[in-house]
Image: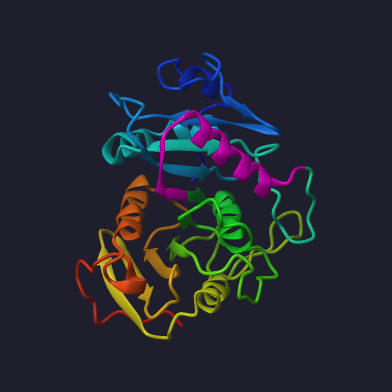
Amino acid sequence: MRLIAPALALAALLTPARALDCPPLAPCAVANGAYALLLPSGWDRSSPLPLIVFFHGFGDTPGDVIGRADMAALVERERLILVVPAGLDRRWHVRPGGPRPRDDLAFAAAVVDDVTTRLPVDPAMVVASGFSAGAFITWTLACERPGRFTGFLPVAGAFWHPVPAGPCPGGPVAIRHVHGLDDTTVPLAGRVVSTGARQGDIRASLATAVRTNACSARQQTTRVGDLTCAQWQGCRPGGRLAFCTHSAGHEMDAAWLSDGLAWLRDRSAGSLGQAPRRNDPGAEPVK
């Protein structure tokens, strides 16, 4: 999926009524970067709301994400704060052995700190998410520096190669990964990109999460809208893991984030997090 809104659209999309305490018609600035901020209409700006920090894909901008109708609808439907950090040169520098012109993990932490200073945020629901390259930094945060987040919802991207063997130094986390079975941009097995770097294998990334969360081999497979989700059971406290697939390619749908938020909120099923909507005994478990 390519998002087509121009980079300059960011300033026009952040009106004074929606970019609280940031300069009018401008993104919010922090050390070494900036982020876009979208708030639900009619919010009293005193009641704490959930926060999603969404990392854009390679070549995209915060304005591209904010400009999506489904993301704006997500903010209204879920009554949440949407924050979209700006990647340096429209990319995220988290590949092992790759260039690090900016510490993007520290930048992500600075963004969360800045938002929580400006706005009342529900501390029980501070979620990192991202699409494609944005999912690569989401997985890296979950492994290396998860402390400021309560859950992770990556879409169509995981670790770069070599995938860390695990367990991750950050300890158990709640992570729900969504991926297209027909994705050729970030295939399940990964691929070599134009720079010569290799994307990590998605199932190897999941295996790292299984080891980190100390989950059992037992899974429950359910249907959630257009997704088939395998959810590991018996994970350590604080650790939950789900792998959801759809039949299409390299795509992003804000509805998957709504499903992910419901999964994070529902802690009644142990490691499952989300109560199953429908059992699908015919589906194969993730190996």
Above or below, comparing residue 210 to residue 155 in the picture: below
Q: Is residue 28 magenta?
A: no
Query: Which of the two residues, 230 or 141, is positioned nearer the viewer here?
Result: 141
Q: How is the image coloured?
A: rainbow
Residue 286 on image: x %, y %: 42, 79
Q: Give residue 67's quadrant in the image.
A: top left
Residue 38 on image: x %, y %: 43, 30
Residue 279 on image: x %, y %: 21, 75
- Residue at the extreme left: 278
Q: Is residue 198 left or right of residue 147?
A: right
Residue at x-position 51% and y-position 49%: 130
Q: Give residue 140's quadrant in the image.
A: bottom right
Q: Is residue 275 left or right of residue 119?
A: left
Which stretch did the figure color magenta?
Answer: 102-127
Residue at x-position 53% and y-position 20%: 22
Above or below, comparing residue 43 to residue 132 in the picture: above
Q: Is residue 19 left or right of residue 104?
A: left
Above or below, comparing residue 257 to residue 168 in the picture: above
Residue 13 visible in the picture: yes
Residue 69 on image: x %, y %: 36, 33
Query: Which of the two residues, 177 or 29, is positioned nearer the viewer here?
Result: 29
Residue at x-position 44% and y-position 67%: 238
Q: Is residue 124 magenta?
A: yes
Query: Which of the two residues, 23 or 277, is positioned nearer the viewer here?
Result: 23
Residue 60 visible in the picture: no
